[in-house]
Amino acid sequence: MPKLGAVTPILRMFDIAKAREFYLGFLGFEVLFEHRFDDGAPLYMAVSRDGCELHLSEHHGDGSPGISVRVEVEDIAALHRELIGKAYRYARPGLEETPWGTREISVADPFGNRLHFFEDQPRS
């Protein structure tokens, strides 16, 4: 049986500076690559942090604003402290315990996409 690999979501963006401020500055991702077909073409870029890769696109039809992505995290409390410590003016995410046994941080990017960082909790 074939083995499936990692999923790489494509998130729509409309403003490169705001995308950089959010994904690089606030969330701590790094740029893997940037691509344009020519100088006037929309930007397509990949960002990564700790093995989590997201693609961001200005291309019409790539991604639909308002999607949700779940990202597993090993130390959600540390990520929460990191994000709150950055004092990002557009988000002060909380750390929530869910009824289904996870702890989660949810943030919306400047384009309406939602990222849900989660860590499974031990079951008693």
Image (cartoon, helix red, strand yellow):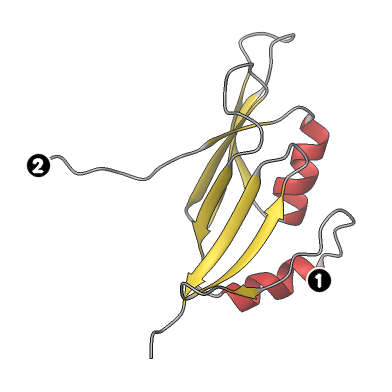
* Number of other residues with Cα within 10 Å of mark 2, as a class: few under 14, some 14 to 19, many 20 or more: few
Quarter location, residue 32: top right
Work out which quarter of the rendered image holds the N terminus and state it.
top left
Of circles 1 and 2, the one toward us is 2
Is label 1 in a helix, a strand or a loop?
A: helix
Image point 66% across, 41% down: which residue? 113
The residue type indicated by label 2 comes to Met
Q: Residues within 10 Å of mark 1 (few under 14, many from 20)?
A: few
82 shown above or below 46: below
Q: At which x and y percent is residue 86?
A: 82, 65
Residue named by callout 2: 1
Query: Mark 1 sits on what residue?
Result: 85
Q: Which amino acid does label 1 sit on?
A: Gly
Quadrant of the image containing the C terminus? bottom left
Q: In this view, does 41 lie to the left or right of 124?
A: right
- State the mark number for residue 12: none
Q: Position of residue 101 (x, y in %)?
A: 47, 76
Above or below: residue 67 compared with residue 101: above
Instruction: Name the residue at the left extreme.
Output: 1
> Is 89 on the left or on the right of 105, as rendered?
right
Q: Name the residue at 80% across, 45% down.
A: 21
Question: Of label 1 and label 2, which has the lower sequence position?
Answer: 2
Badges 1 and 2: C-beta atoms under 8 Å apart? no
In the rendered image, residue 87, in percent from the top left (x then y), is placed at 86, 65
CA gap between label 1 and label 2 equals 46 Å
At 40% across and 42% down in the image, what residue appears?
Answer: 7
Examine the image and state in which quarter residue 10 appears: top right
Across the whole image, how many numbered discs are drawn on residues? 2
Considering the numbered disc 2 on the image, is that residue within a helix, a strand or a loop?
Answer: loop
Coordinates of residue 11 in the picture (x, y in percent): 60, 34
Tell me if 105 is positioned left or right of 98 in this view.
right
Q: In the image as oriented, which residue stretches furthest toward the bottom?
A: 124
